[in-house]
Amino acid sequence: MGENKYTAIIKKEDDWWIGWIEEVPGVNCQGHTHDELMESLAATLKEALEFNRQDAIATAKQNYKEEPVFA
């Protein structure tokens, strides 16, 4: 599976960096540094996508196929 690009909306607020992944609701993180925030966002995004994938497969149950979608 290829690597996809997502958009992080980030800002520094007091002593924290906070951010959200624009394309995936619920993926948001914070970190003490910009790098820490970006690493956390990437890990959380990966987990969320895998969870969503497993949830979709479980819902489909059987006789399904996977196809790419381009927007």
Image: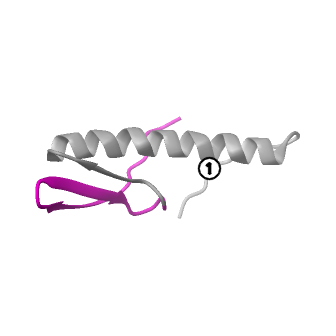
Give the residue at the far right of this rendering. Answer: 63
Q: Residue at x 21, y 40 (%)?
A: 36
Give the residue at the far top of this rendering. Answer: 1
Q: Which residue is mark 1?
A: 68
- Going by the numbered disc 1, the residue's amino acid type is Pro
Element class at badge 1: loop
Q: Is residue 21 above or below residue 43?
A: below
Q: What range is drawn magenta here?
A: 1-25
Question: What colour scheme does the image use?
Answer: one colour
Rendering coords of residue 11 (x, y %): 19, 62
Rendering coords of residue 29 (x, y %): 33, 51
Residue 65 in sight here: no
Position of residue 7 in the picture relative to residue 70 (left or right):
left
Rendering coords of residue 19 (x, y %): 29, 57
Q: Residue at x 55, y 59 (%)?
A: 70
Q: Is residue 59 above or below residue 54?
A: below
Q: Residue at x 62, y 49 (%)?
A: 68
Is residue 6 inside the magenta stretch?
yes
Q: Which quarter of the picture shows residue 43?
A: top left
What is the crowding at mark 1: few (fewer than 14 residues within 10 Å), some, or many (at least 20)?
Answer: few
Rendering coords of residue 30 (x, y %): 27, 50
Position of residue 31 in the picture relative to residue 61 (left or right):
left
Residue 45 in sight here: yes
Position of residue 25 in the picture relative to residue 42 (left or right):
right
Q: Is residue 54 above or below residue 16?
A: above
Is residue 10 inside the magenta stretch?
yes
